[in-house]
Amino acid sequence: MELGIPLNWVLALSAILFSLGALGVLIKRNIIVMFMSIELMLNAANIALVAFSRAHGNLDGQVIVFFTITLAAAEVAIGLAIIVALFRIKRTVDIDRAALLKW
Amino acid sequence: MVEAHEAMTWSVIKGSVEEWSSVLLVLAFPLAGFLINGLWGRRLPKKVVGFVACGAIAGAFIASLYQLVMNLALPPLQRSTQVIVYPWLEAGPVKIPFALLLDPFSIAMALTVSGVSFLIHVYSVGYMAHDEEFSRYFALLNLFVFFMLLLVLAGNLATMFIGWEGVGLCSFQLISFWFTRERAAEAGRKAFIVTRFGDFGFLVATLGLLAIFGTLDFGDIAIAIQTNEIVKPWWGGEVHTLDALNKPTIIGLTLGTLICLGLFMGAVGKSAQFPLYVWLPDAMEGPTPVSALIHAATMVTAGVYMVARLHFLFEQAPIALTVIAVIGAFTAAYAATMGCVENDIKRVLAYSTISQIGYMFLACGLGAYIAGFYHLITHAFFKALLFLCAGSVMHAMHDVLDIRRMGGLAKKMPTTALTFWIGGLALAGLIPSGLFSKDTILHAAEQQKALWILGLLTAVLTAFYTTRLGIKVFHGKPRDEQLYEHAHESPDIMTIPLIFLALGTLAVSVLWMPPFLAGHWTVLPQYLQPVFGEIHEPSAQEALSSTLWAIGAASLGLIVGLVVYVLKPGMLWGLARTLPWVYQLVAGKYFVDEIYAALFTRPGRRISELISAHFDLGVIDATVNGVGWLTAKIGSTARRMQTGFVRNYALFFVVASVLLLFYMLVRGVMMTR
């Protein structure tokens, strides 16, 4: 591996970002913030993939990243649509107010 | 043994289905009738249902007739053909095909069955005309004929067993045909359970044969016995067939004897012999044509047919043959005594059937298979006739069965009365064909004095109760004026089969005439000779003396009957009063039903109730309910996990992922070490 940032550092960054995202999903009640946290997690995974791709010297990881980005775009389209629909009914983005489907 | 057979070789040719496909028609017609009436009968008009049912049986009869013609065209020693329809059960060395056997014996029996069945079907159209379950009745009746023909034409014991159980099923269904009547339902159950008791023996014996011979094929077993082939029985090694059959068992009898007794046990149940006869009188709860067809002419004679079919096996077990002869003779006399005191017109005939089948077993036990079979044929005709006459009387008397309320009906129903007397006298052995067939049996028994005397005694009793029945029903003063006023002759569709059966009763006597009447007129024995071997035709003089004995016995019964019931009607009551305990014993049917109830039925019921209360409720039901209860409990607890908060679900994800990662980490560390 030539000069540059060591792989472990990049992986550490990815792990930190992923944990932050997961924490955000777990503790936030605002559904839009939760949504952004999910994006954070996806991109943390992307960073790890790209880092491995570079470390191994092939493009497989980068190809998967493109798929992930596409998936994230689709997810945003559907997710935002659901959020808008939810907001129209509930007049709020507080996810705890939408806890009707339970035992 | 008068009819001792020559050492004979019965050869069976193996034929292909393609070549012998016409035999399948015999079975296909009744089965098609059953399917049509069973599936669509309710939507078809009664006329069509009746036509289909009768047509199916007529088709079977014509197909059987065709087989007879084809069979007669072959030289005598090539008249037995085994047709393998398809390979059925194949497991390792054991191969049991679905096979049919076409030989003079099975064809003659198939003709008798389908011929008598046809007349009874026609009669049924009239008898059941007002019944709402018309189509179910005919569907079952056709199914019965199908199974009966399958039993008759079967080429191995397994195929025969299908027919054997099938006729039992139809019998059960038809006895309890009017199942809303408690007595009919109970009678059906009784018939089913009692015959099943005998079938157990039949099945065990069948398996025993399979374990010795490795085949259930009639022809193969016969040849193995004739040539004393080497077989591989279940206890290992290779032994000669006869040694295998003569292998002693722990209870002292040989293996062959035990197998034959097991088979005979099945015959005892199906053919209502002592001690398993109790179901047959109760079976009279079914419609009368059913009694005529199943419980007189065909199904109950299946036991006799089976014993004769396997005669080569029974001949290796003389003890079993003796048992058969003794049980047959005893049952004949025993059932006849009950026939003398019974007051239910159909039950008298039922006891008479038991008694006549006893004669047939007596003949088989003595090795006179053809005599037994001859009696089977003649009995099929005259007993079917008698039952149908009884049905005609019931029709006229609004289903009254008690002969004490009848009398003088000859004036109202002359055809029924006339045909009844033809059947009755044939049963009594006073006119052909009953005279000839009973005579051949008595002649065969002449050497065994005890059996012969029982046979003659039965002949006396038979003539007596037949006379009693005929006189009480058709002659004298009407005892119930009101019923008498409404009595009328049955419609043509019922009387015409009666006339045909009466003519048939007289006509079948041409099958085998005694030598002093018509030289050597022995159509039946000649035709059956390839199966049963040559018979020793008695000289005219011997035959004449034997016949005179038989006629003498029957006449004695007739005269006593006439004296007691016509000339001095009070006499019998005097007799019953002087010997009250005898009368009580016989009228109570020897209290066999009560003994069985005390010994088997009630303890069986008690045990069943205990099992039902404790094992069934306490173990089986409790297990099933417990599983349900547990599932419900787990569900009601676990559903609390479903809070509705997205956060909780996300937490499950995260925690599970972390645990999974942790697990993989630990595993990775362990493996690298």
Image: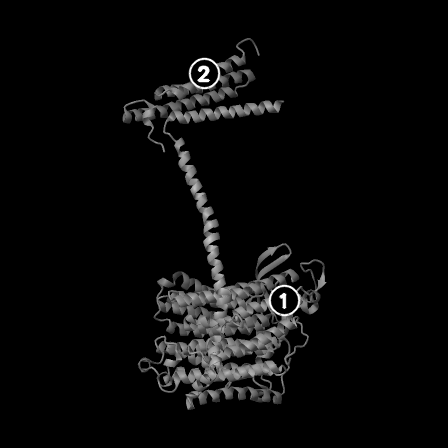
Q: Which residue is mark 1?
A: B258
Most extreme residue toward the bottom is B567
Residue A20 at what x, y percent from top left? 43, 17
Give the letter of the chain under mark 2.
A
Quadrant of the frame with the C terminus of chain B: top right
Residue B448 at what x, y percent from top left? 62, 81
Q: Which residue is mark 2?
A: A17
Q: Secondary structure at mark 2?
A: helix
User: Is residue B29 in sight in this rendering?
Assistant: no
Q: Secondary structure at mark 1?
A: helix
In front: label 2 or label 1: 1
Specify the label residue A50 is tagged with: none
User: Is residue A51 in sight in this rendering?
Assistant: yes
Which amino acid, by three-letter code, is at mark 2? Leu
Q: Is residue B569 above or below residue B251?
A: below
> Toward the viewer: B87 or B634?
B634
Residue B580 at what x, y percent from top left? 46, 81
Most extreme residue toward the top is A3
> Toward the viewer: B251 or B472?
B251
Asked if labels 2 and 1 share a chain, the reply is: no
Q: Are marks 2 and 1 in contact (CB under 8 Å)?
A: no
